[in-house]
Structures are given as structure tokens and as C-alpha cells.
Image: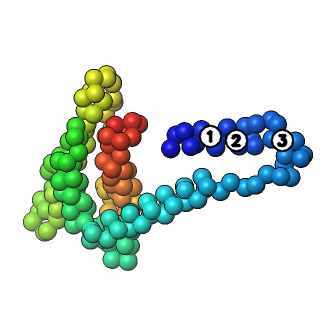
Amino acid sequence: ELDYLKRLVDISPRSNMAAHTPSRASSMNKDESLTQQLYKQINYKEEEDERRLQQYSTIPGYSCYKNVAGSIHWMDNLVSRSTSIPNLSITKEIIGESYKKSVNEGGYDIFAIKVTGDGVAAKGRTTEKGIVFLMTGIHARELAPPELISRWIENLVDDYGTDAEVT
């Protein structure tokens, strides 16, 4: 895939001064193969995201956002998936409880999810990874941040071990 992209850059008129002659410009054909490949990947990703989201319960009227039960189910599923990925560990821990739960009016436990991996170290390389702490879902009407972070974490898990930047 990388060789294909390098070849596209090499034959691109923008990277070759000889290509900017008037005779060359009039005979150029548009190569849409890269655009078509990217479009297919984007469509595939959207279909995959939609399919994954459908397996979790969502907020009524806002089907693109998981509700609390859907988020807890998502975390459990992520922890389960991680057991089949070498050098990746995902844990879910209860770190407290909501106010409503603390006064016996329903409510939920408050969870933290920890994603860590030693894929780089397992290959004998050294790394000094920093710790990233993200906190979302603090206020009830802030729907997007928890969903955004959950999708980002899911992307990290999906690409772990296959993408060097993620691993």
C-alpha cells in the first residue's frame, strides 16, 4: 500500500515539473483510483461504525450516542475483545458511584477504563510513552465527548498491533 502511494506521488503532476508543460496538461487523464480507494475505506468505516453502534442501546432520539447501559455493555465488550489481542490489556474498574446511587435513588456506578499495551516493548524496542488521562461524561447533557472518546479507544484497539503509531 505504501509503495502504491509513493508511485502515485511520483507520477503526480504536482510533483513533476515536466508535467506542467502546456502539452502535458492537455493530455493528462484524471487518476481517481486513490480517491475511489479512500472513498471505499470511508464508506466501509461508516458502515462498520453503524453496525457496531447498533449492538448497544442508545439514547432515545439520538441513535448515534450510547446510553449508560450501552456504554457499560461497550466497556464489557471491549475488555472481552482485548483478551484476544497480544500485548494489549484493557480493564474496567468501578471508581465511585453517581449521586443518585449514593442516596439509593437508582443511579449507576462510575467506571474507569484503562487501556495499556506493551507491544513495542515485546518487540525489543524501547519507548517512553506518556500517560493520557481523559475524563468524559461529567455532565448529563454532554453527549458527544463520551461517544467521541469511546470511538477513539475502539480505533486504538482495532489498530493495535497492526499500526505502528497506535501500537
The mark lying in front, picked from 3 and 2, is: 2
SS for dot 3:
helix
* In this picture, residue 122 sits left or right of residue 147: left
- Neighbor class of circle 2 (other Cα within 10 Å; few <14, some 14-19, many 20+) is few
- Front-most of 49 and 58? 49
Q: Which mark is residue 20?
A: 3
Q: Which mark is residue 11?
A: 2
Find the distance from the CA under tag 3 to the CA under tag 1: 18 Å
User: Which comes sooner in the sequence, label 3 or label 1?
Assistant: 1
Q: Which mark is residue 59?
A: none
- Front-most of 51 and 21? 21
Q: Which mark is residue 7?
A: 1
* Pointers 3 and 2 in contact (C-beta within 8 Å): no
* Pointers 1 and 2 in contact (C-beta within 8 Å): yes
Question: Which residue type does callout 1 highlight?
Answer: Arg
Question: Which residue type does callout 2 highlight?
Answer: Ile
Q: Residue at x 56, y 43 (%)?
A: 4
User: Which comes sooner in the sequence, label 3 or label 2?
Assistant: 2
Question: Which residue type does callout 3 highlight?
Answer: His
